[in-house]
Image (cartoon, helix red, strand yellow):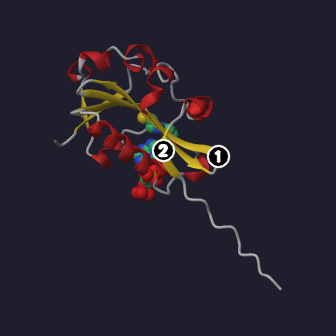
Amino acid sequence: MTTIPPAQPTRSAIEPAVPADLPAVLALLSANGLPHDGLAEHFAAALVARDGDTVVGSAALELYGEAALLRSLAVAEALRGQGLGRQLTTAALELAHSRGVRRVCLLTTTAQGYFPNFGFVPITRAEVEPAVQASAEFTGACPDSAVVLALHLDD
Ligand SMILES: CC(C)(COP(=O)(O)OP(=O)(O)OC[C@H]1O[C@@H](n2cnc3c(N)ncnc32)[C@H](O)[C@@H]1OP(=O)(O)O)[C@@H](O)C(=O)NCCC(=O)NCCS
């Protein structure tokens, strides 16, 4: 008798997002109370985690020359605590580095305790590059109470 082996758990793959991923990423952001504003315009620098055909995580960069905004980091609730957030963040930082970014900033109301694991430190809004300050997240989508964190990338 042939024994059928049990299905192996699928490992999530981190990949560049494609335009068709936008609705799934927006749904993930909605589920996590994260803003949509400006993401479509910067989707060329977005990453997704896929479990089979399903988008289970996201991260995106808004690229402004030597500065970038890291945004839209989210992992499906059922898959948290397995390192997907770390993989997405690390991949986004590697992408930023490969694009010549020297400093990555982010705004958060929910995860100020998460990003210091990657070296992010708090800064004031006034210290943020003007192009990043002009982004949709800074000009409206994120509340004034959001914390600003920044990370210098090594050469
Ligand atoms: C933040 C988030 C992306 C982390 O994803 P994840 O895949 O669970 O993260 P990892 O598996 O890489 O890391 C898990 C670790 O981070 C910690 N952590 C997770 N979310 C955290 C948060 N919001 N603040 C502080 N620590 C957090 C966990 O306690 C865990 O710690 P441990 O390793 O000591 O047990 C996920 O919790 C999420 O989608 N949150 C909702 C959306 C959000 O707030 N995004 C940030 C927007 S700026």
Rendered view: 122 above or below 51 = above
Q: Which residue occupies the foreground of this view, 118 or 10?
A: 10
Image spot of residue 53 (x, y percent): 64, 46
User: How far apart, in angstroms, are the residues tagged by discs 2 and 1?
Assistant: 12 Å
Q: Residue at x 28, y 39 (%)?
A: 98
Residue sitting farthest toward the bottom: 1
Amino acid at circle 1: Asp
Within 10 Å of the Cα at label 1, are there few (<14), some (14-19), or many (20+) other Cα atoms? few
What residue is disc 2 on? 15
Mark 2–mark 1 CB contact (< 8 Å): no
User: Which quadrant of the rendered structure holds the C terminus?
Assistant: top left
Answer few, some or many: residues within 10 Å of disc 2's Cα (few below 14, many 20 plus, some between 14 and 19). some
On the image, the x and y values in percent for residue 55 come to: 59, 42
Mark closest to the chain's N terminus, 2 or 1: 2
Q: Secondary structure at mark 1?
A: loop
| The residue at label 2 has a CB less than 8 Å from ligand 1 | no
Residue 77 in the figure: left or right of residue 65:
right
Q: Which residue is mark 1?
A: 53
Q: Amino acid at mark 2?
A: Glu
